[in-house]
Image: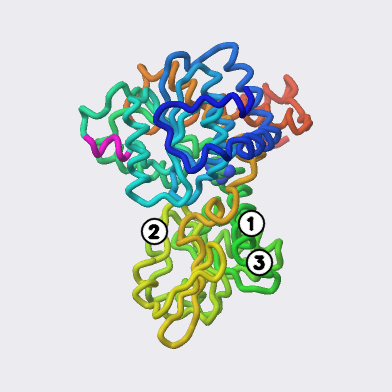
Amino acid sequence: MTDSETVVPSGSDITDPGLAAEGGRRIEWAGSEMPVLGLIRARFEASKPLEGMRVGACLHVTAETANLMVTLRAAGAEVHLCASNPLSTQDSVAAGLVARGISVYARRGEDNQTYYRHLEMVLATRPHFTMDDGGDLVGELHRRGPEAMGDIRGGTEETTTGVIRLRAMAAAGVLRFPVISVNDAQTKHLFDNRYGTGQSTIDGLIRATNLLLAGRTMVICGFGWCGRGLASRARGMGAQVVVTEVEPVRALEAVMEGYRVMPLAEAAPIADVIITVTGDCNVVDRRHLELVKDGCVIANSGHFNSEINLAALDALSQKVREVRPEVAEHTLPDGRRVFLLAEGRLLNLAAAEGHPAAVMDMSFANQALSLAHMAANWRTLAPGVHEVPPEIDAEVARLKLAALGVAIDQLTDEQVRYLSSWEQGTE
Ligand code: ADE
């Protein structure tokens, strides 16, 4: 279908349908970097694993997500999409999707009320399956009580933060349907969280500030997969990287990777840039803000805008002004300036375009295959959090290697026998 043959799905709420042509080009460009998802789409077109199903998706509305939505539609699903963050929507992509007949409820910069109204609009379509990034759709569904569950059968979750929330719901005995934790697939977190967040966060930092990173002290709060990726990319740009952690094993790993590790209270006074990627709240707290030097840049690349104590920063600030798009200069009473990026929301999506399509290819291949698996098996999956089946993980890796033109060795029969035997030891 071309962009001129616009079919606006009823109920969509986007900023500007006139941006459809630009959005369409962005969707195509991203699609050309997503060969695995493209192959799955071709398979789904033939097998229709989601025929007649309604999917409610709450994801970052990017060109990569658009390719996933088109894939779900090719599988036979009716898809309704809202944003998983008020600042991550690419308005042209939203328009491009609407022009392709997929309903979208998302406007970049929407306020909190609109954000939740958009979730509501997706839930009003009575989805059979949810696809979440951060758990807001599932959380909202559960807050409405059992009668609001409608036709729900199961869901998938994209991100670490969402999986943590789902596990908390399951532990409290309140999660009412099965959800597959896509984040836990190896072909998701080892690549998306590490290389995706690593690159896209640096991209957001540079687009927002145009800072030279070489020689700067960059403090990375959190050394999970995202923190690891970000620290390595920051080091690659010549920054002096300091890592802060609360888990001893991760902290030790950071030390042995050659980073300086210290409490944030020690790191704050020497930081040129502080970036949080922990998934926790108030990691940069008032006591740290009181210590930072003049000109310190503070940003977050974790899912929620809870990692920097924004209320404390506001309370400490005598003056706030926007000095560049996504850069707010906060002047403290003693004259020090703190530059807060992207309102403390995820820097990589708010100030850049999120992870590159080539890495989202694997994440969203896992999403598509996991949803098809859920659609085929939801009756036998108990309410709770379920792993991505290992066959899916291995299939995504195989397809990505094939797309990259990389061949690998195979075990010989002798090696297979050797690995499954125990009799043979030192010879
Ligand atoms: N999360 C991080 N990067 C993303 C992207 N490009 N699209 C959708 N979700 C993302």
Q: Position of residue 282 (x, y in %)?
A: 38, 64
What numbered label is drawn on residue 210? 3
Q: Indicate the quadrant containing the C terminus: top left, top right, bottom left or bottom right.
A: top right
What numbered label is drawn on residue 203? 1
Region rendered in magenta: 139-144
What type is the residue that disc 2 sits on? Ser
Q: Is residue 261 visible?
A: no
Q: First in sequence, mark 1 or 3: give its number.
A: 1
Q: Position of residue 271 (x, y in %)?
A: 55, 75
Q: Using residue 138 as the reference point, say whether residue 242 is left or right of it.
A: right
Q: Using residue 179 as the reference point, say whether residue 45 is left or right of it.
A: right
Name which residue lies at 51% across and 72% down: 339
Residue occupied by mark 2: 306
Some atom of ligand 1 lies within 8 Å of the CB belonging to the residue at label 3:
no
Q: Position of residue 292 (x, y in %)?
A: 49, 79
Q: Which quarter of the picture shows residue 186? A: top right
Answer with the quadrant where ligand 1 appears in the image. top right
What type is the residue that disc 1 sits on? Asp
Camera-side residue: 263 or 8? 8
